[in-house]
Structures are given as structure tokens and as C-alpha cells.
Image (cartoon, rainbow, N blue to C red):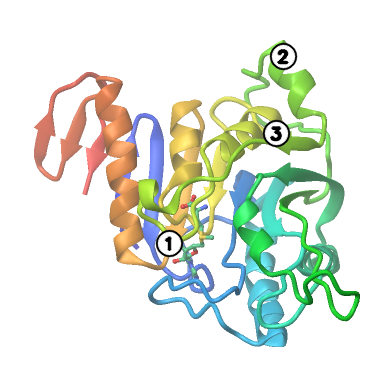
Amino acid sequence: MQPYFETAEPECRLYLADVLAADFIAPESVDLIVTSPPYNVEVVYGTHRDDLNYAEYLEFCEAWLQRCYQWLKPDGRFCLNIPLDKNRGGQQSVGADLTTLAKRIGFQYHSTIIWNEGNISRRTAWGSWRSASAPYVIAPVELIVVLYKQEWKKSSGTRQSDITQEEFIEWTNGLWTFNGESKKRVGHPAPFPLELPKRCIKLFSYVNDLVLDPFAGSGTTLLAAVMHQRRAIGIEIEPTYCELARERILEYLRSRQYTLQIGEEKEVYGELISWR
Ligand SMILES: C[S@@+](CC[C@H](N)C(=O)[O-])C[C@H]1O[C@@H](n2cnc3c(N)ncnc32)[C@H](O)[C@@H]1O
């Protein structure tokens, strides 16, 4: 399958495809997966239905988690950004359930980072106001569950880390506080901020490692990977978001004076980049 777009240097490929049907990623080839799957909270994405019943949602998650497990190297890592819980369409312990599911598939558990995103918009559903009848409690946080395939200690890769002393000290504290991303600014219904994949990539991968986002959306993980000299692969089912990702990455590369090859046309900025 041809990618929706690809760049040669730094190497980045985005596929317009369904993660459940993707056959273009070699088994045991990926160093790090950073992703935020659909949360099943009735977001309107286009192709993907985000209003499954909970059992169907867990079935979908089991299927794509299994694929991710196959794609990871034995010392590969997995940063899974998911909600702690949800209250829309019935209360569910999403974080606990997906962690258990991933462990059943074979993933090893490392830790959970709590991302305090300071999202106060969720503080509008009180349940019973000032009454013990049925109040709703909701934490304005999300999780980044950190899993790995077989070995936590990395044995493959360049051994070249690019994290600073300050970043290492701050980010190994598993409470991360930074704002969420604006849907309007990015043009996607559920983007995460660049800071999230940036931290995961710098903390958990070496320069030139292969980073995968199977739910690439607006391409935030790919952009962070390209910015930090990692190779990147993305999968996204929706053409509009593939185009958005392409534009975001293209804009960054242009700003960095890379050479772009667009189809047969070559825009000369610097290094060779090929585009479909
Ligand atoms: C929560 S969003 C990811 C947003 C991304 N992290 C960003 O910063 O833009 C989930 C994405 O998964 C995509 N998606 C849903 N089902 C998919 C599938 N079966 N295969 C590939 N992508 C899918 C949706 O279209 C949506 O863009």
C-alpha cells in the first residue's frame, strides 16, 4: 500500500487506512507507540463510530491492541493516552479496563502517568446539585499508561538520548501538568498537545527510533517525531485528518528549510523530502 504521504529525511509515513486492516508494518519493527485511541464518547470523527456499547468498544480495543503488540520490538514501549474514566453513556472505568485488556494480550505494565490537563469544561455535570442523592465526581485528568512488550531495558537503537537534565527530572515525576490542545486551532475534534508525544518520545526512545501512532488524527505524534529526529509511521482512517497531518508536517519542514519533493515537482529548501 502506498502511503498518503511520506518524507525521506526525516523518514515519516502516514497511511490512510484502518488500523485493523493495516498490513504495511513489519512485525517487531516499532520502538515506541504513542497514541490516543477514540474514547467512545460520541465524538464525530467521520468514518469511525464513537458511540459503540461498552462491550463492543472493548472488543475494538482488544483487536487494535493485539496488532500493536505484534508490531512492537521485544524491547518496544507503548504510551497509551486514555481517559481515567467516563460518565457519558454510563460510568465506566476505562483506564483500568484497557490496562487489564492490554495485560491480557501480553503487554507488561510499567507505570501510569497522570496528565493533569486542567480541563474545567467537564465540571458542568454535577448530578444532583448540593445533594447526596446522586452527585457526580470527575477528575480533570487523563492517563498515559506506559507498557512494554518483553524487556523494559532498551537493548536496540542508537543509544543516543536527547533529553535534558531538567526534562528528565521533571518528566520522571509521573504527574504531568500542561494544557490540552484546542480543537479549533488544530482543526481536529480530539487532538492532544504536542507536549504529550514530545515528552514520551524524548523520555522513552532514542534518536532515529521508529515511532508509531495507529490513530494519527492531525499528526501530532508524527510531528513530534519529525521534530526530534525519530522515524515515524502513522495510520489514520479519515482523509481530512490525513490532509491536516500532511499540512502540519509540511509547514514545519518548510519552516526548517528542508527540500520538498512534491510528486514529480521538487521544491528546493535543503535536504531531499519526497511527497506523493
Ligand atoms: C483521539 S483521535 C487522535 C488524535 C491525535 N492524537 C491528534 O493529536 O490529532 C483518534 C483518531 O483515530 C481515528 N480512527 C478511528 N478509528 C480508526 C481506525 N479504525 N483506524 C485508523 N484510525 C482510526 C479517528 O479518525 C481520529 O482521528
In which quadrant of the rendered view does residue 271 lie?
top left
Q: How many marks?
A: 3
Q: Is mark 1 within 8 Å of ligand 1?
A: yes
Judge by depth and name the residue closer to the eye, 252 or 29. 252
Can you give x and y, in whole percent of width and height, for residue 40 in the image?
60, 74
Question: Looking at numbered disc 2 in the image, what kind of residue is underneath it?
Answer: Glu
Can you give x and y, in whole percent of width and height, for residue 193 in the image?
53, 42
Residues packed near mark 1 inside 10 Å, few (<14), some (14 to 19) or many (20 plus): many
Judge by depth and name the residue closer to the eye, 160 or 140. 140
Q: Is residue 257 above or below residue 185?
A: above
Q: Is mark 2 within 8 Å of ligand 1?
A: no
Give the secondary structure at mark 3. Answer: helix
Q: Is residue 68 left or right of residue 126?
A: left
Q: Is residue 162 above or below residue 1?
A: above
Give the secondary structure at mark 2. Answer: helix
Spatial CA distance of label 3 from label 2 is 16 Å
The residue labelled by disc 1 is: 236
